[in-house]
Image: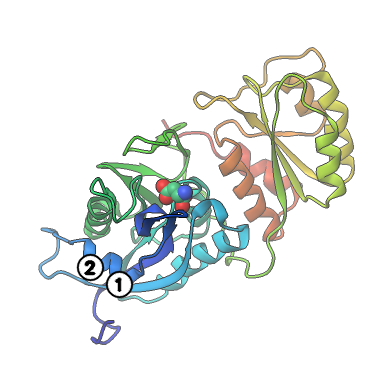
């Protein structure tokens, strides 16, 4: 699709599917557009460069992001890292479904040490809808890549005119064009300084806690060889006392247990006891994720364990996610 030599300054656009690439069909909304199709719809209009850079499209996959495997998400992170090995790459745009963008964008953030911009974007309305928001989001993402202020910020997410760091974001609306919110907008960048693992990623499960939850769910995850378990606990990381015994058993079995909150905003500070409070869970060996909520904590634990991190490394990682402001 592009004839000029690869040494020209260029933006790499990695297409993975999602609503931004989707059409409505009788069987529901499904990804249809290629990277070349998307490039045809996004107009890059930048004042920050004297000539418009060409855009190299990469059709990495074409899936709804809710149907991605963790291996797919690692493959996207690897594709971004690969694109940045070319010094002529100005930056990278990834088009992705919004359902799991918070995980893949954050995973990519963990592996990209480069200062060149990497921007994820998506859409809430399919490409064949009269309301389609994809072209505007894509144009904004491409423009962002060319802006000097985008450098050194790690992975960014651009939706509906808003630009957020991938660190701490979560999907907050199933319908609003600005689909995301952030737990905290200023979480520190923490690059793992390891290559993206290409083999099977470590299995890490996430469990939501609620009154009446069966403590046996944790044992079931251990029995199914989970390397890590992330608990989306209530309030500031609290659970029923019966959960504590299961955490002790999981930790004894060598499973990394991380506890965070199902509440979207605020720091998760271990304060409560009573047998199942965060104070008890921490004593039982769980690591408290104070800022990253379950989806991002889970992908971080998977990245860490897939690259040979020990439980001490995982603990240090979560200690290091305190906001800078
Ligand atoms: N289900 C879609 C996806 O995540 C939703 C979207 O793209 O907004 O792929």
* Distance between the alpha carbons at the discs numbered 1 and 2: 6 Å
| Residue furthest out toward the front | 26
Q: Position of residue 158 (x, y in %)?
A: 32, 47
Q: Position of residue 64 (x, y in %)?
A: 49, 56
Residue positioned 25% across, 45% down in the render = 131
Q: Which mark is residue 321?
A: none
Quarter residue 6 falls in: bottom left
Residue positioned 60% across, 27% down in the render = 262
Q: Which secondary structure lies at badge 2?
A: helix
The quadrant of the image that shows the C terminus is top left
Q: Is residue 193 visible?
A: no
Does residue 81 appear to the left or right of 276 in the view shown? left
Q: Which secondary structure lies at badge 1?
A: helix
Which residue is disc 2 drawn over?
Answer: 40
Q: Mark 1: few, some, or many residues within 10 Å (few <14, many ≥20)?
A: some
The image shows residue 85, relative to residue 234, as above or below, that is below
Does residue 94 appear to the left or right of 294 in the view shown? left
Which residue is disc 1 drawn over?
Answer: 36
The image shows residue 123, relative to residue 33, as above or below, that is above
The image shows residue 281, relative to residue 147, as above or below, that is above
The quadrant of the image that shows the N terminus is bottom left
| Residue furthest out toward the top | 274
Q: Mark 2: few, some, or many residues within 10 Å (few <14, many ≥20)?
A: few
Q: Nearer the viewer, residue 314 or 93?
A: 93
Quarter residue 75 falls in: bottom right
Residue positioned 72% across, 60% down in the render = 308
Mark 1, ligand 1, within 8 Å: the answer is: no
Q: Nearer the viewer, residue 64 or 148?
A: 64
Q: Nearer the viewer, residue 66 or 4?
A: 66
Does residue 319 appear to the left or right of 5 in the view shown? right
Do the residues bearing badges 1 and 2 touch, measured as CB atoms within 8 Å?
Answer: yes
The image shows residue 252, relative to residue 126, as above or below, that is above
């Amino acid at each position: 699709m592009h004839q000029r030599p690869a040494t020209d300054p260029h933006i790499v656009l990695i297409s993975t599917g999602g609503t931004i690439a989707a059409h409505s069909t009788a069987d529901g909304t499904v990804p249809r557009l290629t990277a070349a199709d998307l490039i045809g719809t996004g107009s890059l209009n930048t004042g920050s460069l004297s000539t418009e850079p060409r855009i190299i499209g990469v059709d990495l996959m074409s899936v709804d992001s809710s149907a991605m495997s963790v291996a797919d998400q690692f493959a996207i992170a690897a594709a971004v890292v690969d694109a940045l090995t070319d010094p002529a790459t100005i930056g990278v745009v990834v088009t992705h479904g919004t359902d799991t963008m918070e995980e893949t964008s954050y995973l990519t953030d963990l592996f990209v040490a480069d200062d060149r911009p990497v921007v994820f974007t998506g859409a809430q309305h399919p490409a064949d809808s009269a309301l389609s928001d994809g072209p505007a989001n894509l144009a904004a993402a491409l423009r962002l890549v060319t802006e000097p202020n985008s450098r050194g910020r790690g992975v960014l997410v651009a939706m509906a005119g808003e630009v957020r760091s991938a660190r701490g974001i979560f999907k907050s609306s199933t319908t609003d064009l600005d689909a995301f919110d952030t737990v905290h907008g200023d979480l520190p960048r923490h690059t793992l300084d390891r290559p993206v693992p290409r083999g099977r990623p470590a299995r890490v499960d996430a469990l939501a806690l609620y009154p009446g939850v069966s403590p046996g769910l944790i044992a079931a995850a251990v029995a199914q060889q989970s390397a890590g378990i992330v608990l989306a606990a209530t309030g500031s990381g609290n659970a029923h006392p019966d959960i504590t015994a299961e955490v002790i058993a999981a930790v004894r079995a060598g499973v990394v247990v991380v506890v965070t909150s199902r509440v979207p905003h605020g720091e998760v500070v271990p304060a409560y006891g009573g047998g199942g409070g965060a104070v008890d869970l921490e004593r039982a060996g769980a690591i408290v994720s104070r800022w990253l909520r379950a989806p991002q904590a889970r992908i971080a634990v998977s990245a860490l364990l897939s690259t040979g991190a020990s439980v001490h490394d995982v603990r240090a990682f979560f200690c290091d996610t305190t906001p800078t402001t």
